[in-house]
Image: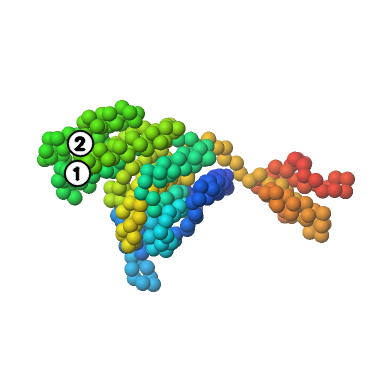
Amino acid sequence: MHWQLPDSIHDALPGDAALLETHRRRLLDLFRAHGYELVMPPLIEYLDSLSTGVGRDLNLRTFKLTDQSSGRTLGVRADMTPQVARIDAQLLNRSGVSRLCYCASVLHTLPDSLMATREPLQLGAELYGHAGLEAETEIIALLARALDAAALPAARIEISHMGLFRALADEAGIAPEQETRIFALLQSKNVPYLQECCAHLAADMREAILVLTTLYGDTQTVLEAARARLPALPAVRTALDEIQTLAHTLRGLSVGLDLADLRGYHYHSGIMFAAYVPQAPAAIARGGRYDRVGEAFGRGRPAVGFSLDLRQVLRYAAHETRGLRAILAPQAPEDAQLAALIAELRGQGEAVLTALPGHSRESWREAGCEREIVQRNGSWCVVPFADL
């Protein structure tokens, strides 16, 4: 019988698993070098914790089950951001800046796209406790370094700002249920339906919301058009000024704007950004500011972060997937010299397999043996694996 996995769920075979683990460690070490401490939240929590604050946007993507111990509803995490926010707000309880990072599997009820997995390996970094644009600058620069370390340099960082939509929605007096609908249409740049949905709004507000779908491209051009075509509301001016300042600070990177590229309606509160590369049809990483996320856990804190699916990143990166590169050692348990050589090789990071009786040399080559330990002139040495 051929056993099948659920749709959009995949095994990681040895070569891919080794590649994932190598880059997981490499990127976490990169984050650590920048002061980000690793946290490991649990795979499941009570649903009310996962669906509070940040998690409200994740409710439909979360697998739910009943806890046989308490009778309460549990959720399998669909995103680690609300868990990390809970850790910062309730467990660490620091008064100053916290830099936290993580990497583990999450589970989605449905894939984000046709080619996406339902079990992303989510890697991310979060900075809590600083409200200034220095936090966005640090996080976006860290994202660019992470993609570069994964052999997938970001071709372009697109910046947007939740404050623009919120300012226009407040000024237009849009009801909360209508906001959700308009936000989704704006997000997808579905202009015909967006026009229909905004038909009841005042003409200037309708035009302002619609014009967001056209405001994308290079920073200077988009900012000039936005200042000319959007209402001169204080919140709009503030958002555009923040975008301009951040884009100038990040001028060493390839930065553009897309003022309708919005995500996380219920929790993003300011600057938002996405990284795009030519190989991928959608954003390879996303992030932004979510200053109100901690309020749901009893302690509001400024917060900025990003996350990516490491599986997806490595799918598009330029890597050769290789299996184990091992050295085959003979069975000689009483030979102290051989045992010392094996220990030395393993200490240097080499994989050394001890041959077991009754197996062909081809089977050891299949297991990844490229070299072997042989005895020559009374000494053990490592030589290329030869067919006999």
- The amino acid type, in three-letter code, at marker 1 is Ala
Residue 140 drawn above or below residue 79? above
Q: Amino acid at mark 2?
A: Ala
Q: Nearer the viewer, residue 167 or 177?
A: 167
- 218 in relation to 109, above or below: above
Q: Position of residue 179 (x, y in %)?
A: 20, 46
Residue at the far bottom in the pictured view: 69
Which residue is drawn at the image coordinates 88% and 45% (left, top)? 377
For residue 242, what is the image quadrant? top left
Q: Does residue 85 lie above or below 318 as drawn?
A: below
Q: Position of residue 167 (x, y in %)?
A: 22, 43
Percent x, y of residue 292:
31, 54
Residue under label 1, please give it. Answer: 169
In the picture of the structure, the residue carrying the numbered disc 2 is: 232
**Quarter that holds the C terminus:** top right
State the image coordinates of residue 46 (x, y, percent, origin top left).
Answer: 36, 64
Question: In the image shown, does 187 or 91 lie closer to the viewer?
Answer: 91
196 vs 95: above or below:
above
**Disc 1 secondary structure class:** helix
